[in-house]
Image (tube, grey):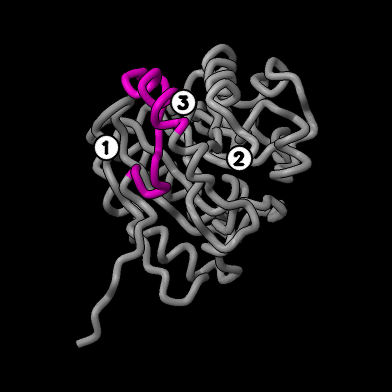
Amino acid sequence: MVEGFNPVRYSVITEKNPREIVMLVGNGCKWRKCRFCDYHLDSSIDEDFNFNLNKEVLSHVTGIYHQLEVINSGSFVDLNVKTMELIKQICIEKKIHQIHFECHWMHKEKVMDFKKMFAHIGVEAIIKLGLETFDYDFRERVLVKGIDEKSPETIAKYFDEINLLQGITGQSAESMIYDIETGLKYFERVCVNIMVENGMPIKPDAKVIEEFRKKVYPRYVDNDRVDILMENTDFGVGKNQIVESA
């Protein structure tokens, strides 16, 4: 865990596929090689700590939209058994019909059994992949994403939704539009994340972000299948809460 990091971990998304969202803690991403992401720091090997924190966060779920999105600094496999059992229990109690999780490509063979586990209790599990871009060379040589597959059709056999990363050097309006259009062709939903500053080598490119604002954003802002996060806290979770001392 990052000292002093006390993020908002529960929120409600009211536009474009309304749902509740929780930001839980697991034992951490197993890949940890992406050159743009330091999200894995929000993790702990103390499973009791993780469960207690997750239990408090999940206590806020109301089932208002019968949909829940679960994010954590890695994949669903990084959440401990007690947390997963609690999530299933809440799905039943709050009448959650559809639940969304994230997963790295390296765990793709576990997706189907995971979906079956939730189907057994009458819940549809939707799995999102952090793909970032369909440009294989850029994705693997620059971003070091760890996805050894080029075919969108093959990737879509395992995953329902994708995250795209945009606003970085080497991209253009044309390449960003291509990625979104390809995502819409093969996947149910696309979430576009604009790069924000963090401690990793990949940095946001102001010129590319401006090109996105002018040429890409207007095309998709009203598309119900496209979420656009200009800031990584736009879903309402992740923003650090400053706790003032007494």
Q: Judge whether residue 220 is colored magenta.
A: yes
Magenta stretch encompasses residue 113: no
> What's the amino acid at mark 1?
Gly
Residue drawn at (52%, 70%), measured in percent from left and top?
1
Q: Which residue is mark 3?
A: 124
CA gap, disc 1 to disc 3? 14 Å
Tell whether 34 sits left or right of 174.
Answer: right
Q: Nearer the viewer, mark 3 or mark 2?
A: 2
In this rendering, position of residue 93 left or right of residue 64: right
* Disc number placed over residue 63 in the picture, else none: 1
Report the residue that reaches farthest toward the left: 246
Q: Identify the mark nearer the N-term, 1 or 3.
A: 1
Q: Secondary structure at mark 3?
A: strand
Residue 205 x/y as whole percent = 53, 45
243 or 118: nearer the viewer? 243
Q: Nearer the viewer, residue 11 or 97?
A: 11
